[in-house]
Amino acid sequence: MIFKATRLALASAALAVAGFAAPAMAADFTAENPECIAPANPGGGWDFTCRQVGKTMQDIGLIKQTMQVTNLAGGGGGVAFAEVVNKRDSDNDLIVAASTATATRLAQGAYPGNNLNQVRWLASIGADYGVIAVDQDSPYKTLPDLLNAVKADPTSIAFAGGSAVGGWDHLKVLIAAKADGIEDVRKVKYVAFNGGGEAITQLLAGSVQAFTGDLSETKGFIQSGDVRVLAVLAPERLGGEFADIPTAKEQGIDAVGANWRGFYGPGKMSDAAYDYWAKQIAAVYASPEWKKVMEANGLAPLDLQGADFEKFVANSVQQIQDISKEIGILK
Amino acid sequence: MDTLAQLAHGFEVALTWQNIGLALIGCLLGTIMGALPGLGPSNGVAILIPLAFTLGLGPTPSMILLTSVYYGAMYGGRISSILLNIPGDEPAMMTCLDGYPMAQKGMAGEALSISGIASFVGAFFATWGLILLAPQLVKIALLFGPAEYFALFALAFMTLGGVSSTNQAKAAFAAAIGLGLAMVGVDTQTGVPRMTFGEVHLYDGIDFLVAIVGLFALSEVFVFLEHRHGASDAAGKKVEIGRITPPWAMVKRCIPTMLRTSGLGFLAGVLPGAGASLGSFISYSMEKRLVDREGTFGKGDPRGVAAPEAGNNAAAGGALVPMLALGVPGSGTTAVLLAVLLSLNITPGPLLFTQNPDVVWGLIAALFIANFMLLALNIPMVGVFTRLLLIPPRILMPIVAMVSFVGIYGISGSSFDLMVMIGFGVVGWVLRKFDVPLVPVILGILLGNPMESNLRRAVQISNGDWGVLVGSPLAIGLWIIAILGFLAPIFFGRILRDRMKARRDDEGSIAD
């Protein structure tokens, strides 16, 4: 009994010391047990983000131990978001993978009771620009060609994409259609598949006339010559092997759509931890190792940290909210 | 010839001591993970990804380790199906139907050996199919549009009645429960949540793994708890282990079954979105239609064990075709493997075979190595596995419950799923009381969603014209098979049943 009490006293003393010591150490915070939540099952984009960034951090010596990746699937990221907000709101060792899909769901209120201000947006690690593509044998050669056909008869062109109706792949087409002056974008025919791979297979099979997706998932098919990309939804032409792909902008359709990838942290994460993670992710971004990963995966530059990234995400959510209202997904 | 030269080169890449060691570790771990309910091939592979990264393995050794786990898990799933009536993973579900009755008859050893051999045959032919036919097979995948997929899934449901030996109405009822459960979640075609009651955990629908572990493993535990007082039951259920290797006659009888179902399973695997579960299901129901003249399927027929095992292992190999050649994962596990390839800076797709021949052929050679290794590991270990039956249920059942909880929590990290699993356990227990088969429930959950999505895609693309469902020769062909499969038992069922009865009387007098 006495023994127990002594131990208790010791423990509380230790805690107190730690408590005093903490503010002094705040300036140079380091994550003891770095953890990354991938809000989906293994194998998806978020899982990739966590594992690849974790691996790079370890490879270039930013963290000593392996980044622990936790798959917390459910609700299209909503389960993980709620878990972070409700249970791990002040965990300094934690980062969570996010992307435009996260912003889309936040914008459309698909995480019941949650909003973007409940977490701290850390940094981006790149962007995957949207593409609109057709089969190589398709009669449509340019994006205006295709959209004119939609104008003439919306039922004649089915767009296949990997996200659900109202998801990012769908919204990209609508952004382009709107920019081209199509009044009632609700008439645009969009068929949802489970992932970009399945959608592109159906494009090759001839079931649908057009494909909307990200450049990274289209890459292999561009190289093999199976698909023709009519436009990339980037502000300007991309470099390297994608330099031949025209942007929508240069074809007179002012549409830009980037699927960004990045991280958020818990809402009550300390400022020191916030700065630490933003800096770590920036260091990953700047490393030659990461440049190689980006190149191999068709990721385009998007280098935002801290306050800049927070503003970017807020804008992104606003834009999606506007278009969602317009097409009637949001009331 | 060129192909064989490349394969030889693949073996050169794969046959280093390090790679063989990795394959051995992968096979062992995979078998164990496959056998544990809840831990299936996809989590098994996912769990080992950090190991591959931490060891700093290159692309080829990493893939060798992970595909060994994949093949190993496909082998391992059958073990708990046969011994405990609990499928280790979803494709092993069909193996319960005949495997468990065999074990109860004291033929656990034979069931395990036969299914091990069947797994080998299935995987062996699938790997050859992958080598020789991958480019051509991609074209088959391209023949399947939404309408054809719908017809394929409809075929699975229409031949369902033949699967469970109990009455057809109950099977239909069970399938309806499964289809109903499949509707839960955000509807991808409209983005509207259905039957989620504002619960964010339900937005992605009900995970079939949670359903399987609940319905099979937990309900088994509940049944045990219920009968706990009747100690006589536990004592009376003393299971004999019997012989370990099957008599040659039994193997010989299964060979045609193994060959047919290898082909069928492989094709099912090649279709993205169909996968190993459909492969083993269709293999079983077709084989039952073809060779079950005495009505022994479902009562411990070795061919009923060989069919789904050859089918699902062949499908596992088949699923690698669209993954490597199209970058489209045909199953949960290949989705994980795809992600690993991507994070190793290798982009699967039409050009993988020309851009990274080392990886592809090294991988294929590794599949062969893993397959032989698994056969060599599995047959002698049958004796060890069967000892599991000697563990008294009062020790075994708590272990089953524990493994179920840990496994399910390990996948999603969510305690909500544990609640759902317990719910399924109770439902499974009730359904068992009413003698309603559980397999159609799982099938409904598993296939309900893709079936519905493909129907709606097909009709949406055709602008509301339902004629599209019979719009291609392939679709019409599938419908004909489906309708024949549905009607044949109704018309010929009575005649067959009479004949069966007569014959069984004959046989009974000899066997007993």
Image (tube, coloured by chain):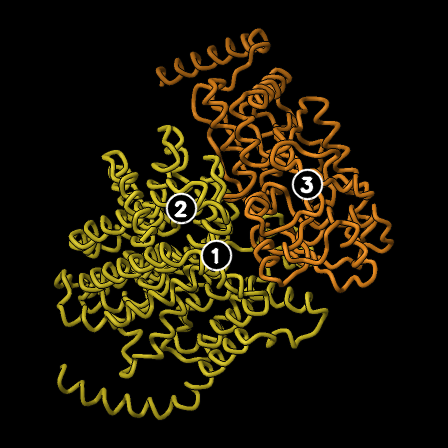
Chain colours: A orange, B yellow
How far across and how far down the image is residue B468, in percent? 64, 73
Asked if badges 2 and 1 are on one and the same chain, I answer yes
Q: Chain of mark 1?
A: B
Q: Earlier in the sequence, mark 2 or mark 1?
A: 1
Q: Secondary structure at mark 3?
A: loop
In the rendered image, the vertical position of residue B510 relative to residue B419, given as above or below: below
Q: Are marks 2 and 1 in contact (CB under 8 Å)?
A: no
Judged by depth in the image, the label closer to the viewer, 1 or 3, is 3
What number is the disc on residue B407? 2
Image point 45% across, 39% down: which residue?
A: B340
Circle 2 Cα neighbour tier, 10 Å, few/some/many (<14 / 14–19 / ≥20): many
Q: Which quadrant of the figure contains the C terminus of chain B? A: bottom left
Q: Secondary structure at mark 1?
A: helix
What number is the disc on residue B458? none
Please tell me which residue lies in front, A129 or B340: A129
In the rendered image, the vertical position of residue A100 relative to residue B364, given as above or below: above
Separation of disc 2 and disc 1 at Cα?
13 Å
Image point 43% across, 78% down: which residue?
A: B161
User: What's under tag 1, amino acid-wise?
Assistant: Phe
List the residue tagged with mark 1: B208
List the residue tagged with mark 3: A245
User: What's under tag 2, amino acid-wise?
Assistant: Gly
Separation of disc 1 and disc 3 at Cα?
42 Å
Asked if badges 3 and 2 are on one and the same chain, I answer no
Please tell me which residue lies in front, A125 or A97: A125
How far across and how far down the image is residue B275, in percent? 44, 59
